[in-house]
Structure formats: structure tokens, C-alpha cells
Amino acid sequence: MSRTCFSSLKLRTELLENLISLNYLTMTPIQEKSLPHILLGKDVIAQGKTGSGKTAAFGLGLLEKLEVKRFCVQSLVLCPTRELADQVAKELRKLARATHNIKILTLCGGMPFGPQSNSLEHGAHIIVGTPGRIEDHLRKGTLNLQELTVFVLDEADRMLDMGFQVTLDSLIEHIPDKRQTLLFSATYPEKIQAIAKRIMVDPIMVQAISTHDKTSIEQRFYKVNDDDQQRMEALRLLLLAHRPESALIFCNTKRETQNVADELARRGFSVLALHGDLDQKDREQILVRFSNKSTSILVATDVASRGLDIDALDAVINFHLSRDPEVHVHRIGRTGRAGSKGIAYTLHTDKENHKIVQLEDYLSQDIKYEILPPLSLLNTPPYQPDMITLRIDGGKKQKVRPGDILGALTGENGITGSQVGKIIIADNWAYVAINHDVAKHALKKLETGKLKGHSFRVRQI
């Protein structure tokens, strides 16, 4: 299918040149359908799945409209989770790198309030944040949105699922009536339609077809008894039979999520749980370990999984069927991305047959059932990841770079570069994935060596 080039848009020269340098040459469907309207200043409702390119769609729109010499908050992007906010801010900075002196600030919960207030005193052009923390800053007078021209709601459906309706209503009172509002959502339920009607003016509705099709994702469905033990056995059989290097398991509640992860861990699997009851430090370390392949299995709720920036996910398993066919499609879209093949396994009981009928209608296909792997597999030892994660108590603010860590590990009497996995640098710490076979040697190298002339505490997480 032919795609329209970014060069066909009326974008500033520096934005177009930067897109070329990023190898962003043609638009994705959601960009092609929404960007022309966004650039005309219209309110837009855009429905598209994760990985559809929506951040660049609204990002280019707000960057084109931005007046750099006006040092005030001109754009606000609201996200449901800190992970998504960080991801969006990172993409915006990448899109803006050829435009000098643009300041993009992230304001999220789980981080100290004071440093954020200090950063706001020095001003910003674009704010990316979560509703609760934005509301905190508005209430305390540390954030002024009176000059706002573009308001973006990203993953709006999940924001409402997380109970941010009242907070959103409060935020709307602090921003000018004369503004452009952009609403991006993977699904379009009635409550999204209701909020759009209240806060938008004659919005243009655009929908992008899913970037995941039947050829890139194989779906398999399994009937199980209405019994927790049998459902758990079925899950273990699928994991032991297919041994995915990275598997994302979906549950419908926080309690189910933790129970499933605890039971898999008790059975010896490499597994972590991701849900809303975790503090920010734990969430961050869980995502690091899963993304760098030092943990094989992540059990999550739909809300917690939004904004995960994880490549090459081997499998998605629906431990419970989602309550909404659109959410099911969004879940399985986590695998089979960027041209790779993916597989999705779904467990369900006879009591959930009505959901299967809804799903068949939504997918326009008949669902056939597979036979579970043999029970004898339950005697097989659980598989383990090849990598472990080391945490270094030094990061960007200590001038630590990925090359420094790699050099320290592979220097004299060190390990090979092929035994080093993903390196992630945060403000005050860094994470590095190491092959399990050389973990002790790598830990000793970093403990006894120096980075940037300094010794840092190192430990396995």
C-alpha cells in the first residue's frame, strides 16, 4: 500500500529535515488521516492502536504550532501512566531536536514534587504528565496553563478506566476555552464520546486500521473448566510447551494479576507482576527487567500495560478474556509488531461463551478451539532467562554513558560484548543486562573498577 510522504505537509523546514534524518519518510495511516486536520488547527479525535505512530501525529502538530520565543507552557499532553509519559516525552524530544531551545518537561507522580517545581520556575514550552500530578501543580500554583494553545489526551480510554474523570474535569477549568484539543484513544466507548462532546469543538473523527493483521498474529483459543487450578495448569502447559522468551499475560484485576504471578513464581518461573498498587521504583525495575529479557514473564492488568515500550514480544496470553472485544485486539497487538510474527493464546470457560460470540462478530471470523499440550509437560522444569540485571547507582547526572559501562565490562580480563545486553541509563542510576553465565564476573568487574573515575555501588536486582 502506497503511503503519503511527510514532505507533502506544510511543516517547517527544520522539522522536515529532522524527519528525514530519523528515516521518517512516509506517514502511517493514523498520521496520514489526522495530521492535515491537526495542522489546520482543528480539534481531532483519532482512534488507533499502540504502535500506530500517534505520538508523531500530535507531536508534529504541536511542534509546528509552537512559538519558541514565547517562553510559556503552550502544549499539555496528558497520559495515564508515567511509563507512557516518559515514552511520549522521549519521542517529542527526538522530533524537536533540530529546533533549538525547546524545553519539554515531564510531570508525573511517583517522583519528588520539589525538583519539578524548581524546573517549572525556569519555564517550559511543552508539559507531558499524568493527571494527578498536573492537578497537584495547578492546585499549588506552580503550573500556569493560561497561555496553552494545544491540549492532548493520549490513551484517553485508559485514563478514564483508571478513574481520572473528576481530575480531567478539574484540569479543563484551568486551561483557556480557545485552544486546540486532540484526543487519541485505542478504543472509542461511550464515556470517551461523552467527554469529547464536552471539551471539543466540532471535532474531526479519524480511525486508522490496526497495524496488526491475521498474517502477523496467530491466535489460539483454549477451553478450560471454571476452576482456578485447571486454568493455572493450562497456563503452565502453554508456557512449558512454547517457552516464549518474553510473554505478557493479561488478567482483568490487580488481585488476579498478583495471584497468577505468585503461583508461577512458586512453580519456579521467572515472572513479575505489574499493576496499580506498586510504587514507582518497583514499577521501573519490573519494566527494566522485562524489557531487557532478564525476566521472561510479565503478568499485568490492561491499565498497567499501557505505554510499555517493549520490542519483540514473543507471546501474549489472555489468562482471562477481556470484557471488551476492542481491548482484546489491543492486547494481542502487543505481539507481532514491526513486521515480526506474533502469537496470542486465550483461555476461556463456557460461562464466557457470550464474549466469544462478541469477539467473533468483532473479528468477522469463526473461533476454533485448540487442544492443550499434554499434562505430562507439568513435570518439566520451568525455563529460565539467559540474562540477569545489574543496577549501578550512577546515571546521567553522574555523566555515566552506555559506552562507559560497556568499556568497564569488556576491558582487561573482562567479558565479551556479546555477553552484555541492553543498557538503560536513568538520572541517578543505570541498568545493564548480563549473560547469566558471567554474572558474578561482571558484578566483580563493576564493583572493583571505576566509571568516570568514580566507584559506584552495584548489585543484582
Image: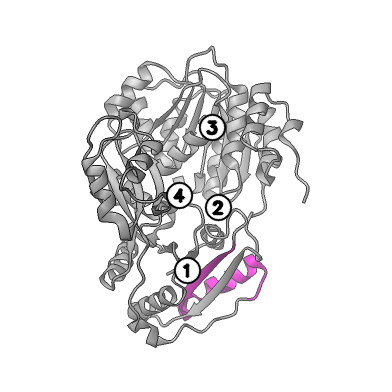
Whether the residues at callouts 4 and 2 have beta carbons within 8 Å, the answer is no
Disc 3: which residue: 94
Whether the residues at callouts 3 and 1 have beta carbons within 8 Å, the answer is no
Q: Which residues are magenta?
A: 341-366
Q: How many marks?
A: 4
Sequence-wise first label, 4 or 2 = 2
Relative to the observer, which residue lies in front, 335 or 425?
A: 425
Disc 2: which residue: 189
Sequence-wise first label, 1 or 2 = 2
Residue 321 got which mark? Answer: 1
Q: Marks 3 and 2, Cα distance to the nearest angstrom?
A: 32 Å
Q: How crowded is the residue under tag 2: few (<14 C-alpha within 10 Å), some, or many (20+)?
A: few
Residue that sits furthest to the top in the current view: 69
Q: Marks 1 and 4, Cα distance to the nearest angstrom?
A: 20 Å
The kind of residue on which mark 1 rests is Leu
Closer mark to the observer between disc 4 and disc 2? 4
Dot 4: what SS?
A: loop
| Spot occupied by residue 362 in the image (x, y as percentages of width and height) | 63, 65
